[in-house]
Amino acid sequence: MSTSKVLIGFLAGAVVGGVLGILLAPDKGTETRRKIMEKGSDIGDSIVDLGDTIKNKFNDMVDGVKENFNKPKGSAV
């Protein structure tokens, strides 16, 4: 199983668990809605951070490939 599938499964499970926990908590409706908004914002921030990390790693990999491609090759004798 690839790392991305495991990460997506973990994030989905965390979201579902968090939402169920909030919805089943004995709070007022306004408090529950506030908590849902906060959790949604936190999860959105986490997803943005993850996307930035993946983008940076991909760009580093591309730069490495470009450097290897542009290296002068040894001359044939």
Image (cartoon, helix red, strand yellow):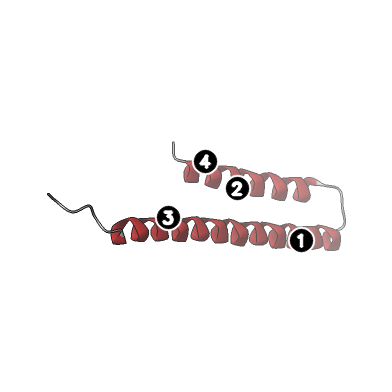
- Which of the two discs, 3 and 1, labels the residue nearer the N terminus? 1
Closer to us: 24 or 77: 77
Secondary element under disc 4, as helix, strand or loop, is helix
Tell me the residue that label 4 is attached to.
6
Q: Left or right: 53 with respect to 14?
A: left
Closer to us: 49 or 67: 67
- Tell which tag, 2 or 3, sits nearer the viewer: 3
- Tell which tag, 3 or 1, sits nearer the viewer: 3
- Rendered image: mark on residue 61: 3
Tell me the residue that label 1 is attached to.
38
* Amino acid identity at mark 4: Val
Q: Left or right: 47 with respect to 69?
A: right
The residue located at (48%, 46%) in the rendering is: 4
- Tell which tag, 4 or 1, sits nearer the viewer: 4
Q: Mark 4–mark 2 contact, CB under 8 Å?
A: no
- Which of the two discs, 4 and 2, labels the residue nearer the N terminus? 4
* Amino acid identity at mark 2: Leu
The residue located at (27%, 59%) in the rendering is: 72
Closer to us: 6 or 40: 6
Secondary element under disc 1, as helix, strand or loop, is helix
- Which of the two discs, 2 and 3, labels the residue nearer the N terminus? 2
- Tell which tag, 3 or 4, sits nearer the viewer: 3
* Distance from the alpha carbon under mark 2 to that under mark 3: 25 Å
Secondary element under disc 3, as helix, strand or loop, is helix
Tell me the residue that label 2 is attached to.
11
* Distance from the alpha carbon under mark 4 to that under mark 1: 25 Å
Name the image quarter holding residue 68. Answer: bottom left
- Tell me the crowding category of disc 2: few under 14, some 14 to 19, or many 20 or more residues within 10 angstroms, Cα based: some
* Distance from the alpha carbon under mark 4 to that under mark 2: 9 Å
- Tell me the crowding category of disc 3: few under 14, some 14 to 19, or many 20 or more residues within 10 angstroms, Cα based: few
